[in-house]
Amino acid sequence: MKQLSKIALLTLTIFSCLILPNQASAKIYIDIDSPSFQQFPIAICDLNNISSGSAQTTNIGVALADEIKKYLSMTGIFNILNKKSFLEKMEPGNPDIIEKVYFPDWSLIGADYLVRGNILQKGKQIIVDSRLFDVTRSELIMSKKYSSASDDQKDLAKTIASDILLALTGDEGEFNTKIAFISKNNDSSDIYTIDYDGSNQTKITNHQSLIMSPRWSPDNKYVAFTSFKEGAPKVFIKNLQTGAEKRVSDYEGLNLCGSFSPDGKYLLLTLSKEGIEDIYSLNVETLRLNRLTQSYSIDVSPAWSPNGMQIAFVSNRSGSPQIYVMDADGNNVRRITYEGNYNTSPSWSPRGNRIAYEGRVYGRYQIFSIDTEGNNLIQLTFDNADNESPSWSPSGRQIVYTSKTASRSRICIMNANGLNIRYLNENVNRAVMPVWSSRFKK
Amino acid sequence: MMKNKITMMGILFVALFSLVLFSGCAEKKAIVAEGTAQEQPSAAQDAATLSAAAAQEALKDINFDYDKSNIGTEARVIMKANADILLKNRNFNIIVEGHCDERGTSEYNMALGERRAQESKKYLINLGVDGARMKTISYGEERPLDSRSNEEAWAKNRRAHFLIVQ
């Protein structure tokens, strides 16, 4: 909510958007999915302050460039070059310099891409005219002008970083996403949300009870979860706009929240009302149930595929918990994990091709990913902690998870290849079960 | 006079004690006959019409192996005693709580705890306890008895607890 009003306040107008004609069809410069992927070196110059009067002496161009670097580094795909290594001399205050690039000076320091821009401050208004160059081809990739009515540099930097990412990868990244998680405090826990950049941590429930398994609706308007507020574990859906909470499942025994269907109409659940833990699909309007699994084993943690056709889940039908995939109607069940004897918490990549999960290896829980046919297994975490509850970012490039040690558990974000780990919030001691939202619409 | 009284009480105590011991032996034989290997005196003979507090005291937790929900040999003996208490005291209902140790996934453990509670409930039904008197609840790994992170604590925490409700 806070975020929305902030965005409303900051009316970001784009004056012109000039993408060179031969690149109009969203050419993807960086194939970050190639197996040889490594971080791409990018040089980001301090923005050239072309303001007049007192605004000319401020370091607003430096501050904004630093913010843009901060956001780009969060994506995990850029190696941001240190500006002390820059060779090309630029005449400050001259608006023409952003177009006049001497590319050899940039290729010499190893930059593949270069960002330059002018910044003009007029009272509260900030106007940025930015350029993105491909250094190796000596080409202009993007030219874009921004006008911000407030002096909120953070949102301006986020928008510019998002456009750079879009131009280079064909995808706007995760800048406008949030992560929901459980903050545990002895016997009382609640659900919080936090922005991708680690700011704006907000408590969204006040149950002070055992609470778990938060799940975003695809439109980010609702969060479903399991709470023991009324004594037994029951499933609730909270409307994040009105704050209203609706109890949607309170059958006898276990009512454990699964995941929303991609169209938001159904919520998968684990119920034990028939005496065994099976997976059900709940129509969130009519509350009509449809039982999907009938096995005598434990079936739990269902996760929908992005196209809605299949469901991944955990079952111990083979004697130990393993990841299975079935069609959305419950048919055609097949096991996809065979390594190890404890594989749980499946999360389906938004790209559809991989499933992340946690597996037990040498007495520790680590994050793995595997393709949906059960091939190409990759271990992503290796450290001396229990790494659990993976959830993919909307672009499918990053994974959020919990890293637990004896003293604390923290929310971490890493690239889908396991590199570039970043702690999301340092001020919560027991943060667990992170789940990534979809992108919030601006 | 005082001395005499104490001696008398002593004799009475010894007599009572041997009676308990004897009936304990009888119980043990019965269990062996049923094919269970463990020996532990059943509380059955004391089970008649207990107060809720006394019954709660008498109902014992059972423990489970890691990632398992079957009622083991040791647990079966305890379950027999628990069933006897429930059969002789029909004035209260129980909630069967399933718990797990801290290792593993919270969600899977929530299901595993429910399965432990369900298996325990089913076992009591097979021993004649009316299923309508029992509800199940899982706390997964969220309510450990012993918060330490070692084998001893984990073994204690993997349990079914039988909570009396009136």
Image (cartoon, coloured by chain):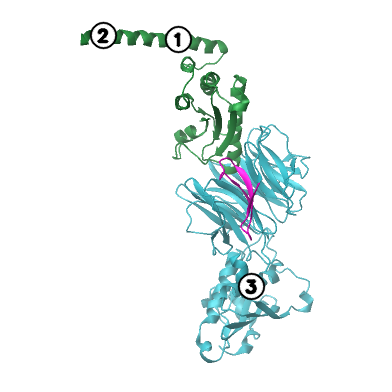
The green one among the chains is B
The answer to whether mark 1 and mark 3 are in CB contact below 8 A is no
Q: How crowded is mark 1: few (under 14 residues within 10 Å), some or many (20 or more)?
A: some
* Residue at the disc numbered 1: B23
Q: Name the residue located 60 percent from the left edge and 77 percent from the top edge.
A: A108
Q: Mark 1 lies on which chain?
A: B
Q: How crowded is mark 2: few (under 14 residues within 10 Å), some or many (20 or more)?
A: few
Q: Which amino acid does label 3 sit on?
A: Ala
- The first of marks 2 and 1 along the sequence is 2
Q: For residue A397, what is the image quadrant?
A: bottom right
Mark-to-mark CA distance, 2 and 1 = 25 Å
Tell me if residue A82 comes above or below residue A254 in the rendering.
below
- The amino acid on which the numbered mark 1 sits, given as a three-letter code, is Ser
Which chain is assigned cyan? Answer: A
Q: Which secondary structure, mark 3? A: helix
Q: Is residue A173 above or below residue B95?
A: below
**Mark 3 chain:** A
Task: Determine if marks 1 and 3 fall on one subunit.
Answer: no
* A132 is within the stretch colored magenta: no
For the C terminus of chain A, the quadrant is bottom right
Return the x and y of residue A264 as percentages of the image width and height.
73, 54
Badge 3 crowding class, 10 Å Cα cut-off, few under 14, some 14 to 19, many 20 or more, is few
Residue A126, picture quadrant? bottom right
Check disc 2 and give the amino acid type: Thr
The residue that disc 3 covers is A8
CA separation, marks 3 and 2? 91 Å
User: Which residue is rendered at x = 55% and y = 73% of the image?
Assistant: A67
Question: Can residue A15 be seen from the camera position used here?
Answer: yes
Q: How many numbered circles does the render carry?
A: 3
Instruction: Tell me: A157 left or right of A171.
Output: left
The residue range painted magenta reads A224-247
